[in-house]
Image (cartoon, coloured by chain):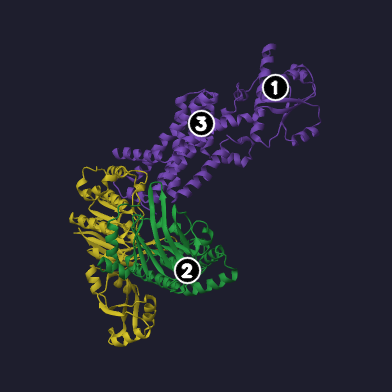
Chain colours: A green, B purple, C yellow
Amino acid sequence: MAADEKVIVADKLTKRFGDFIATNEITFEVSKGEIFGFLGANGAGKTTAMRMLCGLSAPTSGNAQIAGYDIYSQTELIKKNIGYMSQKFSLYENLTILENIEFFGGIYGLTDQQIKVKTEELVNRLGLKSEAKKLVGSLPLGWKQKLSFSVAVLHEPKIVFLDEPTGGVDPVTRRQFWDLIYEAADRGITIFVTTHYMDEAEYCNRISIMVDGRLEVLDTPANLKRSFGVGTMDEVFYQLARSAKRGD
Amino acid sequence: MKQFISFVRKEFYHVLRDRRTLLILFGMPIAQILLFGFALTNEVKDSEILVVDYAKDAASQQVITRIGASRYFKIRKAALTHKEILATFQTGKIKAVLVFPANFNEDLLRSNKAQIQIITDAIDINTANMITNYMSAIILDYQNQISENLKIPYQITAETRMLYNPQLKGAHGFVPGVMALVLMLVSVMMTAISIVKEKETGTMEILLVSPFKPVMVIFAKAFPYLILSLVNVTAILLLSVFVLDLPVKGSVPLLFAESTLFIITCLALGIFISIKTDSQQVAMLISLMGMLLPTMMFSGFLFPIENMPLALQIISNIVPSKWYYIIVKSIMIKGLGISALWKETLILLGMTLFLLGVSLKSFKIRLQ
Amino acid sequence: MEAVVVRNITKTYGKEKTVAVDNVSFSVGKGEIFGLIGPDGAGKTSIFRVLTTLLLADSGTASVDGFDVVKDFKSIRNTVGYMPGKFSLYKDLTIEENLNFFATVFGTTVEANYDLIKDIYVQIEPFKKRRAGKLSGGMKQKLALCCALIHKPTTLFLDEPTTGVDPVSRKEFWEMLKRLKEQNITIIVSTPYMDEASLCDRIALIQGGKILSIDTPANIVKAYPEKLYAIKANEMYPLLKSLKDYPGTLNSYAFGEYAHATFKDQMRNLEDFERYLSDKQLTGIDIKRIEATIEDSFINLLN
């Protein structure tokens, strides 16, 4: 981990919808190659914060640099340098694996030659050679998610945002998915991930937990457990989220 | 029964709380009536007509004066050959050409049979049709008058007579058409969408796993749309009477009874679509493409069926809205009663029973 | 009497006969909380639909409260409560309207069975005029449970009630189920979250339409065949890689802050293994022998 290079710098980032403060002055930094867990109960403001960081929605106030670009004025550059994947949005079900890779590679401006090399790499890495010409819709959920992640990092983005990537996936595939995450982080890609699985929170280098729009805590899993005096992340989360007043 | 009422109440909540649904339900009929009533009738106003008068006698002069006096036509005169007439159409300014043959007056007086040629630009079929109708009406009016003056019995076929529309209101033909269209939209599309929506949100599963009879679920879903459709019929009729000044000549109760029959046909169609589809988008597409389009094409309200190729004319017979359109037109404009419409009514009834049967048969008490 | 009996149920879909449920058998006792634990696509929803009479199985028989799911489907529809997976209630109706509607559909009133839902309903009652679409995930789930309970069902079928719900709401939801159990209501619940398995009386681990194991959570964990070790190091990813490369490793995977691993020959030579790890430049190494969890059992059964 190159300790000093900050790829996400958020300073008092705030988003209001009328009277409602969805995200309230959140301030944090994420280093290059870090696996950063972004946790919170439903309605705590995670999605809003993530949208701002991806350059999809302008903050009401505060500042942020994503991959070195300004969140207000350089959203197009931000989008070029990040990858995004969620449980809901993944790939086109009625295109084959190859067609999906080709399409998304094209979107991110890879050359045909690059796409070819990448496709080969990806298909071999995931062991999907015999399935490459199958429609994505026919694959089991776990494979879809792994494929979806691989496509999200196809253009070697600086940061990849993962929104509950492993919901509903079996425990073995979930771990294979995390292997992919570790590998990407090892290559220097910063991982920004939300999850409802507390054991997955432990896999992160650092964790932030949002409560009612505020960034309540931010530390390594070990430190968090120590400071709350509990044995598992589950309990840390429970103690924090129980005090929450609002839902989504 | 209590379950049924509770169901219907719920359905009304859905409709009344969704602005988009409300807009389609009530905004669209009003917009369509006003659109067809005002915008489209204006099209015929001040149409330029070229008169080629080879007769130049008293009778032809009188007909030309009458046509010129109508606010729908502007007369221009010219003596042209047949070829030149065709050329003038290509300028696009002339909507119709009226040709009086030589000896027009003489033919009329001697043999009671004179000919006038009306040539219209059929690229715009609606305008062409309207112009032909209006002109025929004016000419017929003239014929009536001279036959009265000369005390010579004059044969006028009933059909021509009924096309007669003293105020020359184009909207007349559109009101029944809009009614068929709106009822199609509300009853078929809205019913299909609202049932499929329950499938999508998973509530249909709960309703099936309840003591409430599955078939009743379907009926309870369709019933509110019957009411809403009748409200729409009322709204359209009120609009046409009070805003467009078009009275209903025939029996209003009969009109409502026929409308109810047609609405049930549409509901059966909507139910059938909802049974066969699983997503709101598909239900909407099928309703639009499979129902609305044929209504527009084949009911005879936008495009005259008699101008279509034979194959299409035959196809038009299986479109329920065609029969409904004929019925409504006959009641509203011609003032006919059930004795003249029993055939069309029976056809519509047959379609209703068939469609209801098919939908109920394809309805499953389980998931597929 | 067994409340639910499933015998050799098989269900396939489409022309290709894709198998969703493969010869599944189990039975659930009256007043038991029975969990179907498995990932998406394991066949949980199909089993629920067969039992709630919404789907016909290709073969096999099943009964609920002694009623056959095919012959006596009407009786079953009168007595069971069901919360489907995607269930979202009517978003444009308020809490109160939703509840009243379902009460009437089930031929009862909210007042008649208020006792049963009281505990849950009081939590959402302050918002009863709010539309369901504007509720939080946890509140929606409570309302859905109220609606499924409103006619005092003998058996409750809950298809993934906690999916997409945050851990706090999930915990509350399970506490509600515990209280319902005291009312002698049989509850069959499915979940993809392994940590919820231990909250059931008995569970079936299910994958690819097949039941891998079926027992009490304690017995399933007890039946874990290997000695399981938890290993920690400051560097997680290198640790996982090293574990995979270690010749004595049977299986290894990340598990929270630790990695779990099983070894050939029940790991006779622990010092050798420790040396191997420190040679790999790993720091803060901690190795301990642990009891398996449901998730460990599931992973073991999948391999």
Q: Mark 2 lies on which chain?
A: A
Front position in the image: C161 or C76 = C161
Mark-to-mark CA distance, 3 and 1: 38 Å
In the picture provided, is C34 more to the left or to the right than B365? left
Question: Which label number is shown at residue A107?
Answer: none
Examine the rendered structure and indicate whether residue C93 appears above or below residue C7: above
Q: Earlier in the sequence, mark 3 or mark 1?
A: 1
Examine the rendered structure and indicate whether residue B55 appears above or below residue A32: above
Q: Are marks 1 and 2 in contact (CB under 8 Å)?
A: no
| Quarter occupied by residue C26 | bottom left
Q: Residue C111, image x and y in percent?
A: 22, 42
Q: Mark 3 points at which residue?
A: B343
Mark-to-mark CA distance, 1 and 2: 77 Å
Q: Mark 2 points at which residue?
A: A150
In the picture provided, is B244 more to the left or to the right than A53? right
Alpha-carbon neighbours of circle 3 within 10 Å: few (<14), some, or many (≥20)? few
Q: Is mark 1 on a helix, strand or loop?
A: helix
Q: Which chain carries label 3?
A: B
Q: Residue B207, image x and y in percent?
A: 33, 47
Q: Name the residue under label 1.
A: B67
Q: What element carries label 2?
A: helix
